[in-house]
Image (cartoon, rainbow, N blue to C red):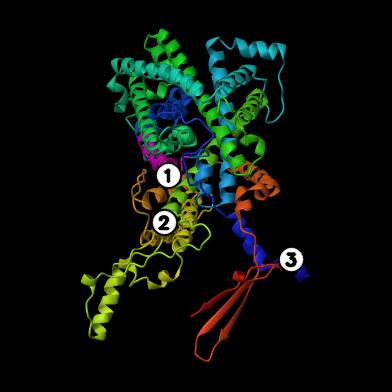
Amino acid sequence: MARWLPRSADVTRFCQKLNRVKTLEDDMMETSFNRCLSTIDLTLLGIGGMVGSGLYVLTGTVAKEIAGPAVIVSFIIAGFASLLAALCYAEFGARVPKTGSAYMFTYVSVGEIWAFLIGWNVLLEYMIGGAAVARAWSGYLDSIFNHKIKNFTETHVGTWQVPFLARYPDFLAAAILLVATAFISFGAKVSSWLNHVFSAISMGVILFILIMGFILAQPKNWSAKEGGFAPYGLSGIMAGTATCFYAFVGFDVIAASSEEARNPQRAVPRAIAFSLGLATGAYILVSVVLTLMVPWNTLDPDSALADAFYRRGYAWAGFLVAAGSICAMNTVLLSNLFSLPRIVYAMAEDGLFFQVFSQVHPRTQVPVVGIVVFGLLMALLALIFDLEALVQFLSIGTLLAYTFVAASIIVLRFQQQKVDAPAPAAGGRPSPEPHEGPSASDLKEYESFSDKLQLVDRDKSKEHREPGQLKAAFEPYLEFLSDFYPGEVVTVAVVTLMVSAICLCSILVFGNTHLHLPTWSYSLLLVLFSLGFLLSLLLIWVHEQQRSTQTFQIPLVPLSPALSILLNIYLMLKLSYMTWLRFAVWLLLGLLVYFGYGIWHSKENLREPRPQRVSARYVVFPSGSLEERVQAVQPSSQPTAGLPDTDTEDCKR
């Protein structure tokens, strides 16, 4: 029975395969894409991904049902929380200007299987997101024409009563996705130009809403008579924050487009900062004018802005709001269709997904196969599926990606930077580096043993510390940590930090409701897991991190990424159990794809050196010297004749 069990060496090698990281090319700017996008192009792509139908629908829904006028505070907190994740994306996008977004960032720092699962989830997130926006676009346009499109389809095509399928096929939603797919396949410049047009119209409508809204504002709508500014209290503000957080999902399209940016080191961080700032400002100001125009408890959640203008006697303004909403949804559609094929391309280029998706059209320089295939799949989803039950997939996939990107920032910042070794001279061995010894002026004679000890201590304190090594100031107190490899303790601490965050958030979310913990155990567990989180954070901080580079770096590492991890995990645990169940099924499908195809076709698998058996003999001579003889053992199938004598190394020490 024991002979059928895998050996420990095989298990170790298998785990190493799962956690191998991507090897980046020396020239990070080399690409088969067309580097044609400027900072303005990337900024408008980010705004298009964030300022969609949520501006016209989400603000009214949260204001009436969750937070009241304090939705403004909810958007401020949500904007700050999104900033933590956005800064992590900005640093990675500048340092690794390759397409793939969260998938690529996880692959270069954490490991292959985690990167594949992130890419697999982001793939579903974009497909469902694009299909859901297309159905919302169709429904909004149908409502303008008094639901004539819906009535015509139900009369002449019929209705279905099948679980997970829509009540009737939405041909309009499928058609808009097919048209958008055609435009995206023409190239990045055409997509960017189309996004500019829709974004300009959308921002013009937002500007009109703000000007007219402040003219029609009535401060009495925030008075105590109408319920006050925060009628639902702090709990309502925080619940509104959790909902408003998803309004800012979409800035990752900038990171996904970094391989098509002219100067990604500067353009990506700036575009993420500008787009997030403008989107946050738009959400806050629209919330202000909306709750000042009409009382918050009389808002129509489905069409709050158009209804507010109608009730104030400006029915014609409703048509402008409808036009702005449709243009905003068009930009979100373009954002999803732009990002999804590029992430699939990155996975296929690395060998983890089917190679057909790594083909780039020679003229348009876009992954046209991925655009067409996933555009058709998205159109099929929008045509026949009921997406309301699946929309929460958007939340869990995005939050998981944010969590891994934040963890990757910590791991990467405390890793040693790879320095290319100088190439050896042709036909010879690499020349040894010259030893830099002290100059004559630095020489000093030390007589006593205590003087020599002081010299050793001073040299040790001046020693250059590599990233991942313990800081010199903490070595006298944490000397046992110096025995580990650089970065090893940090990696363990990051895992401990994430486990502590999961436990802490589980107690906060389920402690009083599902677990029914008594007060003393609830408080004790909160203190214990909080201490675990803080100690892990402290353990990371006492190690050296990489010096500031020429590219953008997120400040306050590891605190900023750790706060982002904590917030993302908290929001994930607030999702329903059915969402987690569907998520688990999708993960299992992803693991089947990875172990059935990805792990065998991975390019990192081809780069791994073949195992070579080595034998060694040690001989101690009477003089006290030790000679080590090392010789490669050739497999029996290979001829050994003709091997040069240099295959045996003699080292004396």
The crowding category of the residue bearing disc 2, from other C-alpha atoms within 10 Å (few below 14, some 14 to 19, many at least 20), is many
Q: Earlier in the sequence, mark 1 or mark 2?
A: 1
The magenta segment is 74-97
Q: Give the spatial CA distance, label 1 vs label 3.
A: 47 Å
What is the three-letter code of the residue carrying label 1?
Arg
Q: Which residue is mark 1?
A: 95
Whole-percent x, y for residue 493 in the image: 45, 60
Q: Nearer the viewer, residue 525 or 177?
A: 177
Tell me the element at label 1.
Answer: helix
Q: Is residue 392 visible?
A: no
Q: Which residue is mark 2?
A: 414
Q: Who is closer to the viewer here, 540 or 106?
A: 106
Does the stretch in magenta take in 113? no
Main secondary-structure element of the magenta-colored stretch: helix
Read off the residue under disc 3.
639
Q: Position of residue 502 (x, y in %)?
A: 49, 53
Q: Is residue 446 above or below residue 561?
A: below
Q: CA distance from mark 1 to mark 2?
A: 15 Å
